[in-house]
Every structure is written in structure tokens, then in C-alpha cells.
Amino acid sequence: MVALKIADITNRVVELGQSCRFDMGHAFRVSRLALRLFDQLAPLHGMGNTERIWLRAAALLHDIGKSQDPRDHHKTARDIIIHSPLLPFQRQERIIIALVARYHRGSLPDRNHAYFRDLDRDAQLYVTRLASLLRLADGLDEGRSGLVDDVFCQIRPRSVLLRLLSRDIVSVRQAMRKADLFGRTFGRDIVIGVEIVPTHLDLGLDSGTDLAYAGAGRR
């Protein structure tokens, strides 16, 4: 089994994104927001580092199908990820990552959908939980404005409060619309508050990229 640095995995993921002419700024913002949600909502989803790495990859690649098929780019992204030789993941992992990217928009996961129906129950749960976070994170970058610098989560009995830090007034309409899968998955409504901060907070991509991932490198 080959252990790779997460930074090396991320570089390969970004290389695939660049080959598909993705919007790197949007991809990085969505990835960072998705990982912030993942880390703070761990008591709800119960997932670990392996699933976090899958989410990062899916978030960076969720829009890579746009240059080929703008209308159905989520499904095109799914197919690119599954068949890409650039990604250092075994096929089962690529399918999970691909489906998480596929469900960032459009219909919610369904047992009749291609690829999803062939996964076992645990893998389907991973896809659904991770996609609910990616879907929400993508909604937080509405219009690709880059206005949301950070998000803080508070888990409540029947809801989750998201406190957004933004440099300007930001619309939360798309985030609320894309909270549908989160609500279905975790049984909690999303409540959003916005706090205006005077300066941009450059938080980078993620602080965990120097870690190692033993699962990478298998095909």
C-alpha cells in the first residue's frame, strides 16, 4: 500500500481540474467551506479522515464537466472522475468521490441512479452525507462571489446554525435551497446568519494537507 501526502493527492486532483479548465477560485472556496462544515459537524456525520479526503477531492472537481456539458455538468464530472487515470484512488473510492460531485446539484441521491444503486449501504451513506455538505458549501458561494470568508456551525436539537463571516451583504438564497439534502440526511433545518467583517480573511485551502493518506495509490 502506498502512502501519499494529502498535498500530493490534492496536486493531482487540481491537475485534473486544470486539464478540464475548471474555475480554480470557486473550486478552492467551495472545498474550504465544505471542509469547515465537515470538521465542525463531525458529531452529526461521524465520518473520519478518509471521508474528509474524498470530500476535498469531490469539492475541487464538482464543476469540471462545465466545459464539456454546461447543462449536465454534474453528471459529466461524475464520469470524468470515475475514469480519470490522474486520480490516485482505487475505483470504489473514485465512484464515491464522483457521486459526491454529481450530487452537488440537481436531483438528490436515489437508489435507481447509475452507480449509486450498485454501492453497498455504507458507501451510499458516505455519498449522501458528503454530498449534503458539498451541496451546502457550493450554495454558500452563490454567484461565485467569494464573499463568504468563513463559516461557524452550531448544532442544535432540531437545526444547525451557520454563522457566515462576509465582507459584504451576501445572499443566502442558494444556500438555503441547497440545504435540502442536508435536511433529509440529518433531520435538521439549516439556519443562516451573516456577520459583516471589514477585511478579507485569507484562510488558504486547508490546514491538513501535510498529512498522509494510506489509501491513496491503490487502483
Image (cartoon, grey):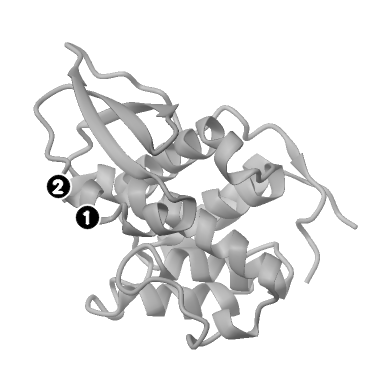
Tag count in the figure? Answer: 2
The answer to which quarter of the image holds residue 18 is bottom left
Looking at this view, name the residue that lies furthest to the front: 157
Mark 2 near mark 1, Cβ–Cβ under 8 Å?
yes
Secondary structure type for disc 1:
helix
Category of crowding for the residue at label 1, using alpha-carbon neighbours closer than 10 angstroms: few (below 14), some (14–19), many (at least 20): few
Q: Is 212 or 131 nearer to us in this picture?
A: 131
The residue lying at 34 percent from left, 60 percent from top is 22
Quadrant of the rendering where the C terminus is positioned: bottom right
The answer to which quarter of the image holds residue 75 is bottom left
Q: Which mark is residue 173?
A: 2
- Left or right: 5, with 114 as reference point: right
Category of crowding for the residue at label 2, using alpha-carbon neighbours closer than 10 angstroms: few (below 14), some (14–19), many (at least 20): few
Residue identified by numbered label 1 = 177
- Left or right: 141, with 155 as reference point: left
Vertical placement of 136 versus 115: above or below? above
